Image (spheres, rainbow, N blue to C red):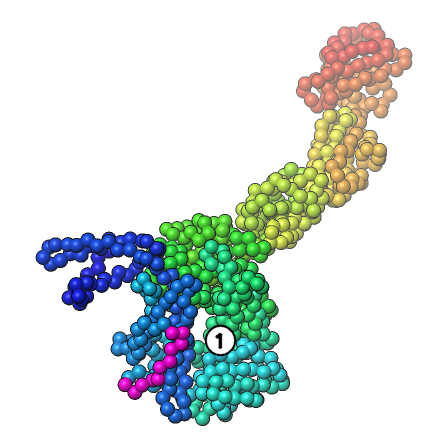
Amino acid sequence: MDVPADMGLWYENGAYQLDIGNLLTLATSDSYTVRVYYASGYDDITLTGTSSPLQSPPSPSAPLFGVTYPASGEPTFTWAVPKSPSGASWSYNLQAYPYFTHSPLLEVQGLSVSFYSDPLHTDGWSLTSASTYYLWNAEAQNSSGDTISYQAIFAAHPSAPVITGIWPASVVAGTTLNINGFNLASPTNVRIGSTDLTVTVSSATQITATVPTPFNETNSYLYPVVTTDNGSFNWGLYYGAPLGNGAAVKVEGYVQDAAGTKLAEALVAMVGNPPINSATRDASKDLGSFTISLLPNNTPFSLRISKTGYQPTYTAQLTLTDNFTAPSPYPLLTYTQLNSLASGMLPGKAAVLLKVKNASEIPLADAIINVTSSSGTVYTPRYAVAPNNYTGTSGTTTDGNGMVLIPNVNHGDRLTITATKPSWAYTTMIAVGAAESLSYGEIYGWVLPPTITSFTPASAEVGAVVSIYGTNFNPDNTTKVYFNGILQNTRVVNNTSITTLVPTGVTSGPITVTTAGGTATSPTNFILLLGLSINLPGQGRGTITGSGGASFSCAASFDAKCDATAPYNSTVTLSATPDAYSSFVQWTLGATTSTNPTGFAVLMDGAKTVDANLGLLGLLKNMESEAVYLNDEANPVWRALFFATNSQPTLRAVTLGTIPLPDNGIAFNTGQSVKLLGGYTDFREATPNGYTYLTGPFTIVSGSLVLDRIVIK
């Protein structure tokens, strides 16, 4: 980097000091090469290094609230100097000056005591206005000269009352409310909303008041107002977090460092209400654990976790109606660790770290993080490829660890963080950026319940393709499809449709889709279609019709079939209508038979096969005269031959079976030439398909008889 420097400003006693900013990741023994160019053209190279870099600034870094102004005499400013880290010895340099100016009101160098007190002198070091904000810079320095500093803002309130904290942070009728602050003695009124509280004890720094019974305030957010002769202080108009309306809740959890080591003596405090706090326990109890009580009910709040040597961590915004146990430890990072989370972290900015999980605390992959900010600043999430590894990573969705970092958040910017993934819903995380601090929270996701809007076809047979339409089908291996309770494992799933097959063994009923998010049921029942097969073993002809569960009509002829489908458990009524040369013989369904050609009922509780037997009445036909000789007439063969008077008439024998002759046989004595053609299944067909058998004596007396496909036995 190029750093312009005027050596005339820095040169003293043969030495110069050069400040190099933006060195975000420092470690012991890091070395730097500094080349200084002179106007004469010469240059010098200097090698320098870090000895023992300080990892975090002192905490508390500034006065958090107003300075007490006594009734007479000078007000005194005090600051509790934080302890040095274990094994280290720090001294402090302090500065205080009005906001937007650079004229210090206070400068203290090399402070090493544990408590600092200083009168507010009339020579300029005075805090005179309740509306004036002051900048505070506390710089820590170790014996090697390594320094680290942090700048914050505080305000002074000369005489009016100031509330610095309230506990418990939730209001219940009949309970006691403790109000801490300055200039609180002899209040003329303490009120929450439109309800006056009864003051039982008051002093300059604390008020104890009783909440009346009944307490009829209905707002979820409550802001006490304290009024004295010197003015009023509304907790909601300044720093204070709102009180909850209901029984106070508590939060339990753990605090650990970047290596996963649980930390003792970390302070966990409610943001905006620091008197509500707790320290993490040591190894003699439950190392790193904490329990913080008296927190607001059903009112958003955050916790601030701090420890000397570490940057503060803020929890994501919590809104609780019951006690809460944090599912994951809260991390505390050093300055170097915080600024090393991702490349390009800038000084004075905040970082927000979050984890996306399901209800079972399992990190979720494939979630897209969306960030909106109160300032309108656009922040780009960084997705970790491994825990705590965000350097140079700019993925598109969470990996299997579920971790996401939002770097370089402006101080005070309120972020609304959401996650999206098809078929999933997520909680929303609220975090507020705090300079040089980490905000940590978790977003929980759950699978949305599926819905079925329709399916097609509405009815089908086993093995047919069915398409199901809806939402949140969650295309993973957990999605199951059932037809009236019968599982079908063969399916192709995407988020809004499923393609599957009708399974074996199914009956009519609803289609259900089950995912990790629940079960959806189709708005209408799926209708199973069953096969109805009608065999025609007889030689007669006619028409077979169906009604009821299936409506159809098909022509009946020898050895043909009539196929249809009907809904499960429906009844199909069959009727047979023979043609002029046929007669109905019998219905056969398993062991059930009927000779009634109409009204044969078939219950479709499974696939069914029915025989419809139509017999043939017309045995022979004279093709010239078109006379038909029926099998119910006496001696139809003799009559056909006898009446064949034309020259070479042709007779067709319409049967593939046997035509029995009379016991005394037949004598052909007409003197005619006759052709007797056999093997036809119907004399209306053009081509024979087999042979016709005549059984009995057959005598030719006069005339000629040409036999084709006729066998005489």
Residue 201, relative to residue 275: is it above or below?
Answer: below
Residue 387, relative to residue 305: is it above or below?
Answer: above
The answer to which of 250 and 660 lies nearer the viewer is: 250
The residue lying furthest to the left in this view is 40
Residue 474 in picture, x, y percent from top left: 56, 49
The answer to which of 63 and 445 lies nearer the viewer is: 63
Residue 92 in picture, x, y percent from top left: 34, 71
The answer to which of 298 and 8 lies nearer the viewer is: 8
155 is within the stretch colored magenta: no
Q: Callout 1: 10 Å neighbours few (<14), some, many (20+)?
A: many
| Left or right: residue 50 compared with residue 278 | left
| Left or right: residue 23 compared with residue 596 | left
Magenta residues?
113-123
Residue on which disc 1 sits: 273
Residue pictured at 28% horizontal, 61% vertical: 21
* Residue type highlighted by circle 1: Asn
